[in-house]
Image: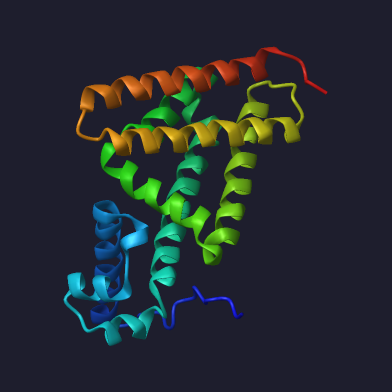
């Protein structure tokens, strides 16, 4: 059985085409937030974007390709933020100040939680997106490990990568929790504080304890 392609059919060049692709991506993001990735269809995207489904297929061969494009955009945004986090000479923050900044950037915007949660769920569940998910998981874990190394952790890179993956799984659980309780801002605030405390406890161990192996 051939693998469904997730590559776009063509890259928009003209201004009108670029606006159409932007609209497709914005509409898809909106539908993911409203209904979740399981309910997403190419027809539904086209209808909400107010374009013929044939126009959608000019740029993307299927809904998976549209989700893939959104995932790539999300990943690029995360990586750009990590460029800032790792610019130690510029921000001159201590480890706990930096972790507080990361917490604010990654977990403090409720408007982004649902979309990021759905994109992560899609990457895990859809075979066509599994390689992208594995690559993202590896890259982000190694980059967070590098931050912990910079601030003095004596743990090995493999140990820090494992810790980073656990920390990010906790973040995914947080997104799910917020998604299920998004009508309760007080609970959302408390949940963020608790998840940051839990993450901080794990990170403190790796900064003050010797390597475990």
Residue lying at 35% horizontally and 23% vertically, measured from the top left = 191
Q: How is the image coloured?
A: rainbow
Q: Position of residue 16 (x, y in %)?
A: 23, 80
Residue 199 pos. (x, y %): 51, 23
Q: Residue at x 37, y 19 (%)?
A: 193
Front residue (pair 194, 109): 194
Image position, residue 175 (x, y; %) = 38, 37
Q: Inspect this view and state whether residue 180 appears.
A: yes
Q: Quadrant of residue 195?
A: top left
Quarter of the rendering occupied by the N terminus: bottom right
Q: Does 129 sit left or right of 179 as displayed?
A: right
Q: Is residue 110 above or below residue 63?
A: above
The residue drawn where x is 25% and y is 71% is 44
Q: How many marks overall?
A: 0
Q: Residue at x 55, y 31 (%)?
A: 167
Quadrant of the frame with the C terminus: top right
């Amino acid at each position: 059985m051939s693998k469904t392609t997730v590559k776009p059919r063509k890259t928009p060049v003209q201004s009108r085409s670029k606006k159409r692709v932007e609209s497709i991506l914005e509409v898809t993001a909106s539908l993911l937030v409203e209904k979740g990735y399981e309910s997403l269809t190419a027809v539904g995207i086209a209808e909400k974007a107010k374009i013929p489904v044939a126009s959608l297929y000019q740029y993307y061969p299927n809904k998976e390709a549209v989700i893939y494009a959104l995932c790539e955009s999300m990943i690029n945004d995360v990586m750009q933020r990590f460029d800032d986090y790792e610019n130690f000479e510029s921000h001159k923050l201590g480890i706990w100040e930096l972790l507080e900044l990361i917490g604010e950037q990654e977990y403090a915007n409720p408007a982004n939680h649902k979309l990021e949660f759905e994109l992560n769920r899609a990457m895990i569940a859809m075979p066509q997106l599994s390689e992208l998910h594995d690559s993202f998981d590896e890259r982000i874990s190694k980059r967070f490990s590098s931050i912990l190394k910079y601030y003095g952790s004596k743990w090995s890179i493999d140990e820090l990568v494992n810790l980073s993956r656990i920390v990010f799984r906790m973040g995914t659980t947080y997104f799910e929790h917020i998604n299920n309780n998004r009508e309760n801002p007080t609970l959302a605030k408390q949940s963020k504080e608790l998840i940051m405390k839990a993450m901080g406890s794990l990170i403190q161990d790796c900064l003050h304890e010797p390597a475990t192996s």
